[in-house]
Image (cartoon, rainbow, N blue to C red):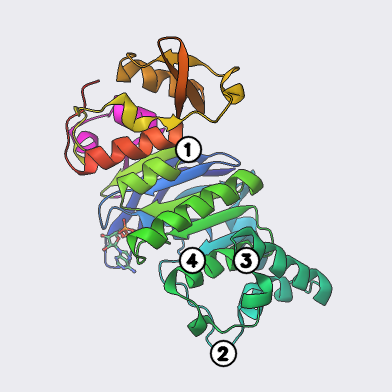
Amino acid sequence: MIRFEQVSKKFPNGTFATKSLDLEIKKGEFFILIGPSGSGKTTTLKIINRLIDLSEGTVWINGKKISDYDINELRWNIGYVLQQIALFPHMTIAENIAIVPELKNWDKEKIAARVDELLNMVGLDPRVYRNRKPSELSGGQQQRVGVLRALAADPEFLLMDEPFSALDPFSREKLQDDLLEIQRKIKKTIVFVTHDMQEAMKLGDRICLMKDGEIVQVGTPHEFLTNPANDFVREFVGSRKYAINLNELITPAPAGGALLSDMKTISLSTPLEEVLEHLELNEQISVEENGKPIGIISRQTALKVMSQYLREGGQING
Ligand code: ADP
């Protein structure tokens, strides 16, 4: 768990990048920091791994002040991924991934096995990729390797600073999906900076919206959509009134329909507000029409479609 208590950062030029932040990030949580440029997201992130020293207040990691940790002990337990991953160009992919395990003196076999395991996890065949140089990979693949490098020594925490924002929309979508899949398996505590609400809605368990170094709202994607704290949040999320057809959220039912039997079931005519409430409690719900199951709505799909609408400035009819 990461806890910020009254944390302020004042730069020598007098700028307050964060002002008396109070924040609690739970174990295993995918936590998003979002806000306009200059709102203090990166500073908040870098305070956690002590790349930036805080001026006032305290940050606790697992009940211990970050200032009381040995800096290596702290950083090895916190993977860090940046927008432009700097893979070492003369090292192979395997060597790049193995940097922290090498520093930690893991034995060679354990490192090799770990590298292969990680490459397999994101669908990069180790036999093809382990001996390649970074320049022989696409931008998306390099970024994927950067994520693997951060995970290599199995840190408990992962800090990600706009890790996908330099990628084309297709690669970006793919890496987001990969990351969600990885997170489902390994359940790290992730703090992820973005300025893209759609990305935040898709990935985050909770979102923290910042402005001028302060927190405007912390909540689930659902809470941001249904209960924005003020006009700034409303504007950042987009208009809440949009015309959405339930059909757009539905993925067809799998053949046989067996999967659907123990799910919460709603009818196709259920108002969107009510559907959102069900999705708050259930990862997915099934939809029926005239008593016959027609498909599934997953929380993730719903948030994704709705945030797409919001971005396009559409109208929701709740
Ligand atoms: P964000 O990540 O949300 O874009 P930052 O955390 O990078 O915001 O910056 C927050 C504020 O602190 C901004 O006003 C920025 O100009 C200022 N700032 C960031 N780094 C420094 C620095 N090294 N020296 C002075 N001011 C800085």
Front residue of 85 and 74: 85
Q: Which residues are magenta?
A: 213-234
From the viewer's perspective, tell me whether residue 295 is left or right of residue 88. left
Q: Are marks 3 and 1 in contact (CB under 8 Å)?
A: no
Q: Quadrant of the N terminus?
A: top right
Secondary structure of the residue carrying tag 4 is loop
Numbered mark located on residue 146 in the image? none
The residue that mark 2 highlights is: 90
The residue that mark 3 highlights is: 71
Amino acid found under the numbered disc labelled 4: Leu
Query: Residue at horizontal 21%, vertical 34%?
Result: 234
Q: Earlier in the sequence, mark 4 or mark 1?
A: 4
| Ligand 1 lies in quarter | bottom left
Amino acid found under the numbered disc labelled 1: Asp
Q: Badge 4: how crowded within 10 Å, few (<14), some, or many (20+)?
A: few
Distance from disc 2 to disc 1, alpha carbons, whole Å, reads 38 Å
Numbered mark located on residue 205 in the image? 1
- Tag count: 4
From the viewer's perspective, tell me whether residue 7 is left or right of residue 66. left
Q: Are marks 3 and 2 in contact (CB under 8 Å)?
A: no
Distance from disc 4 to disc 2, alpha carbons, whole Å, reads 26 Å
Q: Badge 1: how crowded within 10 Å, few (<14), some, or many (20+)?
A: some
Q: Earlier in the sequence, mark 2 or mark 1?
A: 2
The residue that mark 4 highlights is: 51
Q: Is mark 1 within 8 Å of ligand 1?
A: no
Secondary structure of the residue carrying tag 2 is loop
Rendering quarter of residue 91: bottom right
Secondary structure of the residue carrying tag 1 is loop
Amino acid found under the numbered disc labelled 3: Ile
